Image (tube, rainbow, N blue to C red):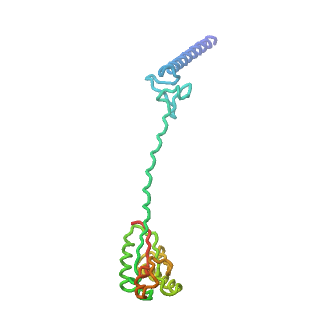
Amino acid sequence: MMQKNNEQARRFGLGTMCSGLVMAGMLAVSGAAFSAGHGGEGFLTDTRGNEVRSGFGHCWGVTWETDTKPEACIDQPEPEPEPEPEPEPEPEPELEQISIDSEALFGFDSAEITPGGRANLRTVIERINAMERVDSVEVRGHTDRIGSAEYNQDLSERRAASVRDFMIDQGVDENIIDSRGYGEDRPVKECDDDLARDELIECLAPNRRVEIHVEGVR
């Protein structure tokens, strides 16, 4: 019985001694690894001198100050994304004004467009439809100062409305067309009252007009 106990003790002692030798060897290797490479900066390297990294890609070491890390262990900043190109600016809208003599559109003292006047307006509509974008169309009726101001105002409004309705019939979007009459309030030419009536009517002809203002992009 005593002999058996002595044998177990001997085996236990040998096992403990072997474990101690293995542990000491591991510590010695670890210590050599810590002291090897990068001038003793304290980072764990393998036998080839490469930094040993954790599963998260971090270097093993005794300090994390950036100025003591070897270059391979310094986290490189993420490259900044390249700025997206700026969109092309929208083209600036242009304003075009078309003026048509009333005689080229209407008969005397009438708001009904003549066949010749319809042909003239179709030419204008073709120019509008050729535009890349149309933002607004303004139709403005004007008269001369012969007759009462009240009558001239009504006539200018009716003529502007007739032009608007014809343009809508020809396919122009009604939501972008606005028609107004200004009567005799906005003359473009002044004439002497001492002129004979026929001469005065001829002199004031530029004031009897319909103006079409188109805003958009060609």
Q: Nearer the viewer, residue 50 or 212?
A: 212
* Residue found 46% across the figure and 71% down from its top: 136
* Residue found 44% across the figure and 88% down from its top: 110
- Indicate whether 127 appears above or below 45: below
Quarter of the image where one finds residue 103: bottom left
In the visual, does 21 lie left or right of 83? right
Q: Nearer the viewer, residue 20 or 122?
A: 122
Q: Quadrant of the C terminus?
A: bottom left
Q: Is residue 29 visible?
A: no
- Indicate whether 86 appears above or below 181: above
- Indicate whether 104 appears above or below 51: below
The x, y position of residue 129, in whole percent, is: 38, 72
Q: Is residue 115 visible?
A: yes
Farthest residue in the front direction? 194
Quarter of the image where one finds residue 100: bottom left
Q: Quadrant of the N terminus?
A: top right
Q: Nearer the viewer, residue 167 or 31?
A: 167
The x, y position of residue 19, in whole percent, is: 56, 18
The x, y position of residue 98, in whole percent, is: 40, 74
The x, y position of residue 95, in whole percent, is: 43, 68
Give the total of numbered labels: 0
In the visual, does 137 lie left or right of 21? left
